[in-house]
Amino acid sequence: MPIYFDLDGTLTDPREGITRCIQYALSALGRAVPAEDDILWCIGPPLLQSFEKLVGRADAHTAVQLYRERFGEQGWLENRPYDGIDVLLQNLCANDVPLYVATSKPQVFAEKILQHFGLRGYFKDVFGPDLHGNLSDKQALLAHARSVVGLTQPSIMVGDRRYDIDGGKANALVTIGVLYGYGSREELWAAGADYLANDPGELGVLLAANYGR
């Protein structure tokens, strides 16, 4: 059974990079700069969507450009894999489970992050939107990924926000929400997650119980 993983909040913790780049963009626009804890909700949704809420539609595209100025230089490095993720991926690959990444982060940055932290080799392919925002919606992204992969058998989507669960459900995937990321238990249950995992170890147990079906 193929498994699709979200990136931010699921494989790696991008808190420092994302929040600092948002603060940089807001400062450059002359807007009030919120504290890091007040913009954690921006981790998960498409970036343009978050900036539309922060600065309005008129300035959202400019804010995205400013964000990427800093992110392309250093923000992508302000990140770290969650403890236990490397072992989880090793075990899945040892069982010949086909693994993919499906993220709302632009594919070019997702590839750089996975390569830098030594995770890229675990995945058969990485799917994400382009820099123009095409395929930033997780439902459309997963539909595209499934089409490219050419697999029709049941699959699993793992993510930390409702967008991951919504996208998985819309594509008839088994969905697992992780509670060590940035979505709450309430958010993930409300989205209809089939299972919840408190940590990568528990996630491994849930995946082992499902990928052999």
Image (tube, rainbow, N blue to C red):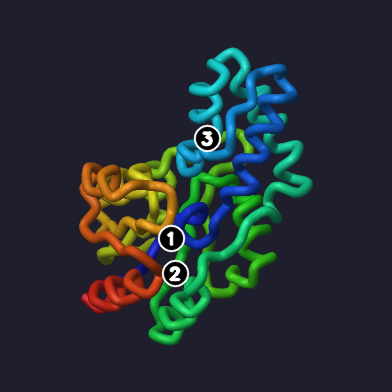
Dot 2 corresponds to which residue? 99
| Label 3 close to label 2 by CB (< 8 Å) | no
Amino acid type assigned to the residue bearing label 2 in the image: Leu
Dot 3 corresponds to which residue? 39
Q: Residue at horizontal 55%, vertical 46%?
A: 105
Q: Position of residue 7 (x, y in %)?
A: 50, 56
Label 2, residues with CA under 10 Å away: few <14, some 14-19, many ≥20:
many
Q: Is residue 85 left or right of residue 206?
A: right
Q: Which mark's residue is nearer the viewer, 2 or 1?
A: 1
The answer to whether residue 126 is above or below residue 27 is: below
Dot 1 corresponds to which residue? 5
Can the viewer see residue 148?
no
Q: Residue at horizontal 43%, vertical 83%?
A: 91
Q: Position of residue 129 (x, y in %)?
A: 54, 43
Q: Position of residue 202 (x, y in %)?
A: 32, 72
Per the image, label 3 sits on a secondary structure element best described as: helix
For the image, the number of numbered tags is 3
